[in-house]
Amino acid sequence: MPPGPDDLDALLLGAPRRYTREEIADLAGVPLERARLYWRALGFADTGGARAFTDLDVEALRRIERLVDDGVLTQALAVGMVRALGHTTARLASWQVDLVLDHLSGGTGIREQVSAEDAYVVVQRLLPEIEPLLVHAWRLQLAASVERVLSGDDETLVDAVHLTVGFADLVGFTRLSARIGERELAHVVERFEQVGSDLLTAAGARLLKTLGDEVLFVAERPAQAVTAALALLDGFVADEAIPELRIGLATGLVIYRMGDVFGTTVNLASRLTSLARPGTVVVDRGTAADLSGEPGFAVAALWPRPVRGLGLVEPFVVTRRRQSSTGAG
């Protein structure tokens, strides 16, 4: 008999579902309300009396409770850790499933063309390889994040970092969404994020998140951020599927929390993006000042203008400085 949905579910979970929420809490030796708190922090709804849990769920619950009992984590920190895992892995899993299903459907996205048997074969091959890669990628990102924190200014807060923040916005995205189909629009956003992420990373910046028609990125130094911004403009200029971009950058102290950045610098970068003309990069005074010693960039002041919530803002447009050529005598 070919594998069905239940077989695929057990393969993905690593074990069959066999316990109710009361049974898993009892087996793990954890109060039911606390077990439900962890479950909700992972991002899942209450299961009622359904047999929704496996032996691996029991072990996971015991593991997080040991960290609390040993004093490694407080109860609040444990819930926060679980919530971070749930929030991040939910997006990761959804993204990966979309990629695989798109492949299995031959790019049509039609669910009828995807069978549980086909999915089982793919998952059976991928899971043993992707799982260790996931842990490896997490360790790499963890090491990079710890290094950024430890290399920061000792006089600032642990979660405060001096960065250049950038927003890149697709011009005319609303009009585009009215002209093309939903699936085609999704491909535009996917391409924008994937290609944009590669371009930003190559220039030394980091993409933090995508907000539909906009990406948020950060860089350690203004020159890196401007290089990344100009690379984004150049990278999509010949791509007819992607609308023209406009980019705003601001430099200053930001608060790093929950994998995101907050603060006045972030707000200013967002406002500058709305001031930028299509195909241009607009920066704040601080970023412009930091670029004064960079020979590869030309900075030109624009008219100061009031911005809601931030007062009078002095924007500057940044371009690559043209290299002067001299003829041979």
Image (cartoon, rainbow, N blue to C red):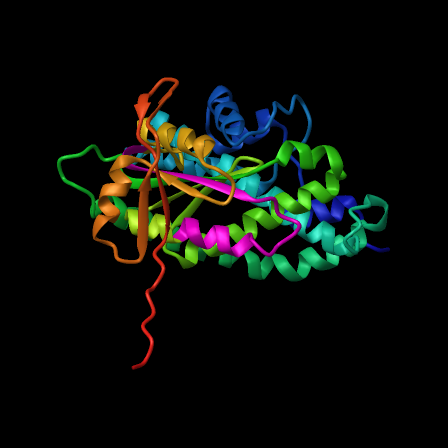
What percent of the width, then of the height, locates residue 210? 52, 39
Asked if residue 282 is among those painted magenta in the image, a careful observer would answer: no
Residue 247 in the magenta stretch? The answer is: yes
Give the position of the C terminus as an image quadrant: bottom left
Q: How many marks?
A: 0
In front of the other: 220 or 149: 220
Residue at image x 48%, y 35%?
A: 61
In depth, the one of 158 and 66 nearer the eye is 158
From the top left corner, tell me how far across and down residue 28 is, in percent: 49, 33
At a point 68% along the width and 55% down the height, the residue shown is: 123
The residue lying furthest to the front in this view is: 329
Point out the residue furthest to the bottom here.
329
Q: Vertically, is 313 above or below 278?
A: above
The residue range painted magenta reads 228-255
Q: Could you tell me if residue 50 is visible in this image? A: yes
Q: Is residue 135 visible?
A: no
**Where does the image place residue 193, in percent across and percent down from the top left?**
55, 47
**Observer-nearest of 182 and 118:** 182
Residue 125 in the image: above or below residue 186: below
* Residue 269, quarter of the rendered image: top left
> In the image, 59: left or right of 293?
right
Q: Residue at x 25, y 43 (%)?
A: 149
Q: Is residue 17 left or right of residue 32?
A: right
* Quadrant location of the N terminus in the rendered image: bottom right
Q: Position of residue 311 (x, y in %)?
A: 31, 19
